[in-house]
Amino acid sequence: MLLGILIYCTLFALLWTWGLVWVLERREKKYRQGNHSFTDAFLAGAFFLVFVYISNIAVLVRWPRAALLYDVALVTGLAGFGLYRETRYRAAAALVRRRQKAEVRLLEHHISKDPSNAAWYERLSEVYEKLGEKERALETARLAAKLEPTVRNAWRVKHLEEGR
């Protein structure tokens, strides 16, 4: 019986902690917003692994009938935290995207005033790439390389052509 409790508590704590680390890493992996590295998520996960493991054992030994409710509460809390963080990640990603689109409009305005400025084409190409518009990024990178044939501009064109 005690071995079963230990195995159950270990597996539950590991799965719960994996879910927490996954939620924390989504900001970096999916939305590319930085701030949380694997090391940060691992430290939070290690703390909560110990907490969930020990508290689960204590609840299972002290109040066996309430153990299922406790585990459901832990999973519900994790799901709520995941939904909250996902909402915040999406809002931040939308804000970044809106700023990038505003930067594109501003750069296009400046390019219309001075079409021979290669630096603006370079930056416009970078912003297009961040927005996911690879064809437009390649087109503006080619214009920048045509206006200013430096190694950096040639490398950028090559990089974008390989990424197609």
Image: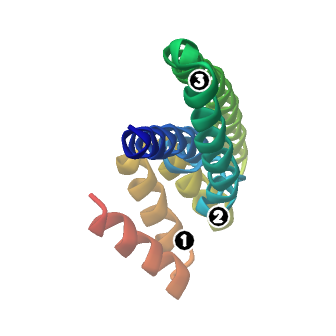
Q: Quick one: SS at disc 2?
A: helix
Residue under pointer 2: 39
Query: Which callout, 1 or 3, points at the residue further toward the start of the chain?
Result: 3
Quadrant (top left, top right, bottom left, bottom right) of the N terminus: top left
- The span from disc 1 to disc 3 (Cα, nearest Å) is 59 Å
Mark 2: few/some/many CA within 10 Å (<14, 14-19, 20+): few
Q: Residue 98 location, x and y as percent? A: 66, 29
Residue 74, disc:
3
Q: Residue 86 location, x and y as percent? A: 58, 26
Q: Quick one: SS at disc 1?
A: helix
Mark 1: few/some/many CA within 10 Å (<14, 14-19, 20+): some
Q: Is residue 139 left or right of residue 19?
A: left
Pick whichever, 103 or 99, lies toward us: 99
Q: Is residue 115 visible?
A: no
Between circles 1 and 2, the one closer to the viewer is 2
The kind of residue tagged 2 is Thr
Q: Quadrant of residue 158?
A: bottom left
Q: Is residue 10 left or right of residue 150?
A: left
Residue under pointer 1: 147
Residue 95 to residue 34: above or below = above
The kind of residue tagged 1 is Leu
- The span from disc 1 to disc 2 (Cα, nearest Å) is 44 Å
Quadrant (top left, top right, bottom left, bottom right) of the C terminus: bottom left
Mark 3: few/some/many CA within 10 Å (<14, 14-19, 20+): some
